[in-house]
Amino acid sequence: MIRGRAWVLGDNISTDHIISGKYKYSKMGRLEDMVQYVFADVIPGFYEKVRPGDVIVAGRGFGYGSSREHAARLLKLVGIGAVIAKSFHRIFYRNAINSGLPVIIANEIPRVTEEGDIIEVYLEEGLVINKTKNVAEHVSPIPEPLLSILKSGGLIEYIKKFGRLPW
């Protein structure tokens, strides 16, 4: 189970919103040095305010733009437990799973959730609950091969553990 406070965002959150292109990985040297800039241009002080397990709740088209995997990896590094959105852009969705960051498509939870609401996510059951509003939504469970990757901590960790891809 994933449990955390909700950070509510709107539609069309791009990878540049998550980590602006002006913070180049090549200039930083280490991915860990970039976490202080996650959502820096969207949510001032996000890095200091976020807690492990917090959940991002957004509208449609989360993760559009650049295909760099840094956006998903940095959300995980900063402590985000899951991203719940009405829809995701395909490459971000894939990068998130490969990075071990759960991504859930939901409609009701993004509609009712406000900043700071407590969210619980049950990946295997396909269930998301806004505990603050007492609203539960059944979502499509994550397919078993992808769930195995998430449980392993990402695709690289999965391959280290099993020596092969899950399909």
Image (spheres, grey):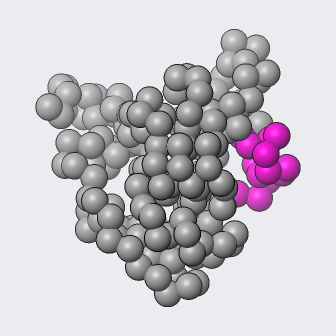
Looking at the image, residue 79 sits to the left or right of residue 45; the answer is: left
Give residue 42's quadrant in the image.
Answer: top right
Residue at point 73% right, 22% down?
21
**In what quadrant of the picture does the C terminus appear?**
top left
Residue at the limit of the structure toward the right, as seen here:
44
Give residue 52's quadrant in the image.
Answer: bottom right
Residue at point 46% right, 70% down?
108
User: How far across and how far down the image is residue 154, in percent?
Assistant: 37, 37
Residue at the limit of the structure toward the top, as seen here:
26
User: How far across and how far down the image is residue 142, in percent?
Assistant: 28, 52
Q: In this view, does 78 lie above or below 21?
A: below
Residue at the limit of the structure toward the bottom, as seen here:
134
Kindly tell me whether residue 61 is visible in this rendering: yes
Looking at the image, residue 114 sits to the left or right of residue 105; the answer is: right
- Residue segment shown in magenta: 38-50
**In what quadrant of the picture does the N terminus appear?**
bottom left
User: What main secondary structure does the magenta stretch of the protein show?
Assistant: loop
User: How far across and how far down the image is residue 92, in percent?
Assistant: 48, 34
Q: Is residue 42 magenta?
A: yes
Residue at point 53% right, 43% down?
61
Q: In this view, does 12 lie above or below 130?
A: above
Q: Nearer the viewer, residue 29 or 38?
A: 38
Kindly tell me whether residue 95 is visible in this rendering: no
Q: Is residue 46 magenta?
A: yes
What is the tally of numbered marks visible in this picture? 0
Looking at the image, residue 44 sits to the left or right of residue 1; the answer is: right
